Image (cartoon, rainbow, N blue to C red):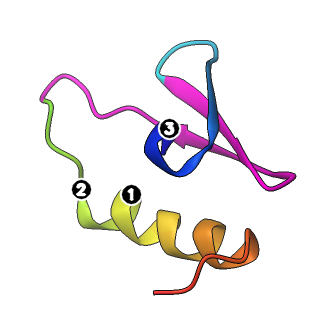
Amino acid sequence: MKAIGAEVTERAGSRVAVTLNGVRAIFHRPHPKPTTRKGAVDAVRPFLENTGIKP
């Protein structure tokens, strides 16, 4: 996210706030394993679309 200009802020627990083009979303870091589930990846698409980034 940082590579496309997003501001990433650590929140409580495993939460991470991401702000891009005035749109903010909260995501959860995967734990205890470093792999991300499909549902978490799917949550990123609407966030990016709301910021004006299209696939």
Q: Which residue is mark 1?
A: 40
Query: Could you classify mark 3 by the number of other residues whose Cα lies within 10 Å: few (under 14), some (14-19), or many (20 or more)?
Result: few
As drawn, 27 above or below 52 = above
Name the residue at 25% across, 26% down. 31
| Marks 2 and 3, the one that precedes in the sequence | 3
Query: Could you classify mark 1 by the number of other residues whose Cα lies within 10 Å: few (under 14), some (14-19), or many (20 or more)?
Result: few
Q: Which mark is residue 16?
A: none
What secondary structure is the magenta-colored segment mainly? strand
Q: Label 2 is placed on what type of residue? A: Arg
| Marks 3 and 1, the one that precedes in the sequence | 3
For this rendering, which residue is in front, 41 or 53? 53
Name the residue at 39% across, 57% down. 40
Magenta stretch: give its range.
15-33
Q: Label 1 is placed on what type of residue? A: Ala
Quarter of the figure that contains the C terminus: bottom left
Q: Which residue is mark 3?
A: 2
Q: Secondary structure at mark 1?
A: helix
Circle nearer the viewer, 2 or 3? 3
Q: Are marks 3 and 1 in contact (CB under 8 Å)?
A: no
